[in-house]
Image (cartoon, rainbow, N blue to C red):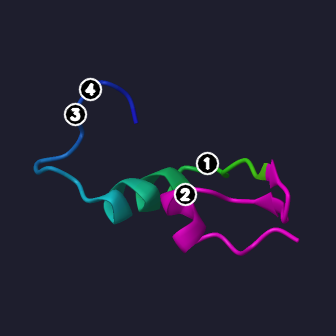
Amino acid sequence: MNGVSVWDHKPTADEMLDARLAGGWVPTPTSTREGDQILGHAACRVPTVR
């Protein structure tokens, strides 16, 4: 999202994530000791990378 507000209310984390995913955004996996993983709120919606 840009600095310009496009919401008529304060969006929830789920609403913002939905908007990003709908726009084609894809989270970048982070390399961890357990392998590549999606971190943060996006991990709730994106399948585990293995």
Q: Which mark is residue 5?
A: 3
Q: Are marks 3 and 4 in contact (CB under 8 Å)?
A: yes
Under mark 1, the amino acid is Trp
The first of marks 1 and 4 along the sequence is 4
- Furthest-top residue in view? 3
Image height check: is 20 above or below 35?
above
Residue type for callout 3: Ser
* Residue designated by label 2: 21
**Which tag, 1 or 3, sits closer to the chain's start?**
3
Q: From the viewer's perspective, tell me whether residue 39 is left or right of residue 33.
A: left
Q: Mark 4 points at which residue?
A: 4
Are the residues flagged by discs 1 and 2 in contact, CB closer than 8 Å?
yes
- Answer with left or right where residue 23 lies relative to residue 27: left
Above or below, 24 relative to 4: below
Q: Please say if 2 is above or below 18.
A: above
Q: Contact, CB < 8 Å: mark 1 with mark 3? A: no
- Identified at 11% across, 51% down, the residue is 9
What amino acid is labelled 4 in the image?
Val
Q: Find residue 16 and report its horizontal and vertical position in percent.
A: 37, 53
Q: Position of residue 21 (x, y in %)?
A: 55, 57
Instruction: Using the numbered discs, state the Cα–Cα distance from disc 1 to disc 3 in whole angstroms.
Output: 18 Å
Magenta stretch containing residue 34, yes or no?
Answer: yes
Residue displayed at 88% across by 71% down: 50
Alpha carbon separation for disc pair 2 and 3: 18 Å
Query: Which class describes the residues within 10 Å of circle 4: few (<14), some (14-19), or many (20+)?
Result: few
Q: x%, y% of residue 19? A: 42, 55
Magenta stretch encompasses residue 6: no
SS category of the residue bearing label 1 = loop
Q: Residue at x 81, y 68 (%)?
A: 49
Q: Distance between the residues labelled 1 and 4?
A: 18 Å
Image quadrant in which you'd find residue 36:
bottom right
